[in-house]
Image (cartoon, rainbow, N blue to C red):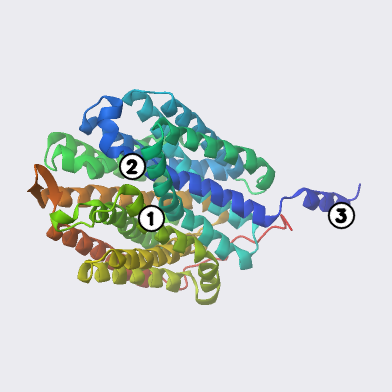
Amino acid sequence: MGSDERARKRLSRTPPRWATVGVLAFAGLCASFMFTLIVPLQAELPHLLNASREDTTWVVTITLLVAAVATPISGRLGDMYGKRRVVLTLLALLVVGSVIAAISGSIGGVLVGRGLQGAVSGVIPLGIAIMRDVLPPERLGTAVALMSATMGVGGAIGMPLAAYLAQNADWHGLFWLAAGLGAIGMILVPFTVPTDVLRFPGRLDVPGAIGMAIGLTGILLTVSRGADWGWTSPLTLICGIGGIVVLLLWGWYQLRTTDPLLDLRVAARPAVLFTNIAAIGMGFALFGSNVTFPQMLELPVETGSGFGLDLIGASLIIMPAGLVMMVLSPLSGWLERTIGPRILFTAGTAAIVIAYTLVLIWSTEVWHLLLSNIIIGVGIGFSFAAMPMIIMRAVPARETGASNGLNALFRSVGTSSASAVMGGVLASLSTNVEGIAVPTRQAFEVCFWLAIAAAVIALVLSLLIPKGDFIEPHPSLPTGR
């Protein structure tokens, strides 16, 4: 059999590109859904799990922690052993974790399940890396924009669905739903995602992975739990200072070891560094609206700072932001090719500044929040589409998975920070209404100012990204029709 005939047969067995992109986007939706899966249950978790409220907050925190640690590690594993293989492994962890949580009636089992669910967040940067491997340049931007949009779409669509199930079915059904979604992904991926043709074998830097996990855990515990523990408490200081020291030692080790978990010299390139730092601000802005807007919409009108909507109604007001991100994917891809990812990133960060400024000035009607949230969807859609493209133009192909994983990690730091900081502000600036502490109007205004500050910093950093710091993306491979 000649080489041409073998090539034709190989191409005939290759799945269509639209199927590859669609299934990877579905996996991304599953991953982002895990972060809002139990939002409707948060107030009832102490009763459902027979545990204290302090303990049940770990049901949210453990997912964020595992996601932050697992994402860059899974990206590195994908570069080494095959991205499709790692995607399937992460989806399998989602299924296992969801089943454990679904059959458990205690907080221990739910925490184990939620931790395993958090690992699936690595499929988003891995999906972007696969797209770089298999798509031609003219299609890459749109596909990456769609994959990036799933970070917001999954949560926006999933929140009203989770709210409906929580109000009308047994709470274990949420985890069975998650298990079913993961199983569908595991079935579809082998048939639609081509086998990796770009691998860069090497050894897994186990000490580097352990060191990064310990350091990040300390930092994220400080950010996410500092308000509850007390910012000057011994436990907070030990986690924060210890995490910083471990990460400094980890960085020293990474610069001196062969085949490190992450090439910090690549991560220090101005385009990569500024984009990653700006990603903290974008994550902060995205999760900031998830913290403040639902509370404003659901608080009773009598409090003077709420609109009295039920959980499903509030979720439907939040949902359009995610839908906007998805609808804008083709436009984001076209703009990336036309004006470049740097300008697109600047436009996205500017939109976030405008959105929070509007809600700071006008937030007396429900439609004011709806309009601002839609603009936030535009800004996040543009920004999240631009960041991976900036990263991929600045790193070699062998670093694609790990570098996108690192960018996702910085976004996770931003979301965790928003949850902790804004939660602390809303708790401290509250008033007593019929025996219940309710955030004041001033509390929400302070949160909006914080979001504006984070977005302004990201805007400035986007302007500092050097125009000439890009290298050509990896050549597209003929992997589909």
The answer to whether marks 3 and 2 mark residues whose Cβ atoms lie closer than 8 Å is no
> Which numbered disc, 1 or 3, marks the residue that appears first in the sequence?
3
Secondary structure at numbered mark 3: helix
Front residue of this view, candidates 456 and 310: 310
Closest to the camera, between mark 1 and mark 3, is 1
C-alpha separation, residue under disc 1 versus residue under disc 2: 13 Å
Q: Which residue is mark 2?
A: 40
Residue type at mark 2 is Pro
C-alpha separation, residue under disc 1 versus residue under disc 3: 54 Å
Secondary structure at numbered mark 2: helix
- Relative to 359, is 408 above or below? above
Residue 87: in sight, yes or no?
A: yes
Q: Which residue is mark 3?
A: 4
Residue 16: x, y in percent?
Answer: 71, 54
The answer to whether marks 1 and 2 mark residues whose Cβ atoms lie closer than 8 Å is no
Q: Which residue is mark 1?
A: 316
Residue 112: x, y in percent?
Answer: 39, 28
Q: Is residue 379 left or right of residue 202?
A: left
Residue 315: x, y in percent?
Answer: 36, 52
Front residue of this view, candidates 138 and 331: 331
Residue 401: x, y in percent?
Answer: 52, 49
- Relative to 211, is 379 above or below? below
Determine the residue positioned at 30% across, 26% down: 49
> Which numbered disc, 3 or 2, marks the residue that appears first in the sequence?
3
Q: Is residue 96 left or right of residue 365?
A: right
Determine the residue positioned at 39% across, 38% down: 168
Q: How busy is the neighbourhood of tag 3: few (under 14 within 10 Å), some, or many (20 plus)?
A: few
